[in-house]
Image (cartoon, helix red, strand yellow):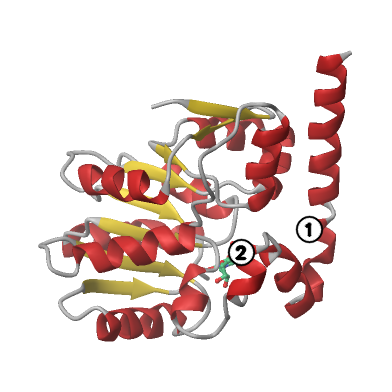
Amino acid sequence: MSKVNILGVNIDKVTMKDAIKMVMVFLESDKLNPIYTPNPEFIMNAREDGEFKKILNEGALVIPDGIGVIYAARINGEPLLERVPGYELTENILKEISDKKYTAYFLGAKGDIAKLAAERMMEKYPGLKVVGWRNGYFKTEDENEIIDEINRLGVDYLVVGLGSPRQEKFIYRNKEKLKVKAAIGNGGTLDIMAGIAKRAPVIFQKTGLEWFYRLLKQPSRFGRMLKLPEFMSIIIWNRIKKNK
Ligand code: UDP
């Protein structure tokens, strides 16, 4: 499958349909396939954190989660096919596996949010087997116990929503120990599934302004979001230099 390089991070040129098909193949494999969901903030962090960049580039599936990544690829003259948000991919997979033998586990978010997300998804997709959940505020010492639980439950699809880069590093560090078939770094997905956080209205999604909606809802993200204009400036500047 072809990849598009955005400032050193290789992103798969896939549609949502392709991504779903790939995950279904992963679920039949005999090792953990990491799935990562980079947006511009990830890519800017990867420029400063070599380990994070290496982790992303070793993903079995690396989907273009943010609209900024789509714009950057277009400006670079090597367009990606479409935006593939991690939240939507996971919801599609949960739907897809609800009439199959595969199981899921939700790890992340505060308090009982993962449990609530599991209950809501199982209600929405009858037959779905979310066999366990755990909040994302645990100590490093507890990690082995969590992994043992996941392994004991025979989990196939692991949703890890610990925020980035913690979730990607968790998956990478434990990829030999975790006996799951696919693990996705999924950010705030569990908050949305539990109904605690809302996705942007469709008009914001369609116009590529989901990030703006999130900024309005959570002004504390402003500092983090300053990376977005910085990211676009670097992309545009590189393109201008290339054309000189
Ligand atoms: N989170 C967690 N453990 C932590 C830090 C964060 O489980 O130590 C959770 C947080 O509660 C939220 C999710 O990680 O559910 C995503 O956080 P963030 O807002 O940073 O990610 P984004 O929404 O940008 O993907």
Q: Quadrant of the C terminus?
A: top right
Horizontally, residue 116 falls left or right of residue 46, namely: left
* Disc 2, SS: helix
Question: Of the residues shown, which amino acid type is indicated by label 1?
Answer: Arg
Q: Say if 241 sits above or below 96 in the image.
A: above
Residue, disc 1 = 224
Q: CA distance from mark 1 to mark 2?
A: 23 Å
Seen from this angle, which residue lies furthest top? 244
Q: Nearer the viewer, residue 18 or 9?
A: 18
Asked which quadrant contains residue 235, the reply is top right
Asked which quadrant contains residue 93, the reply is bottom left
| N-term-proximal mark, 1 vs 2 | 2
Q: Is residue 177 visible?
A: no
* Disc 1, SS: helix
Horizontally, residue 81 falls left or right of residue 217, namely: left
Ligand 1 falls in quadrant:
bottom right
Give the residue drawn at x 38%, y 36%.
Answer: 60
Q: Position of residue 40 (x, y in %)?
A: 69, 46
Give the residue drawn at x 44%, y 85%.
Answer: 112
Q: Position of residue 68 (x, y in %)?
A: 69, 48
Q: Position of residue 114 (x, y in %)?
A: 41, 77
Residue, disc 2 = 206
Crowd around label 2: few <14 · some 14–19 · many ≥20 (10 Å): few
Q: Under 8 Å from ligand 1: the CB of mark 1?
A: yes
Horizontally, residue 200 falls left or right of residue 174, namely: right
Q: Nearer the viewer, residue 35 or 175?
A: 35
Q: Nearer the viewer, residue 167 or 226?
A: 226
Question: Of the residues shown, which amino acid type is indicated by label 2?
Answer: Lys
Q: Which mark is residue 84?
A: none
Q: Quadrant of the N terminus?
A: top left
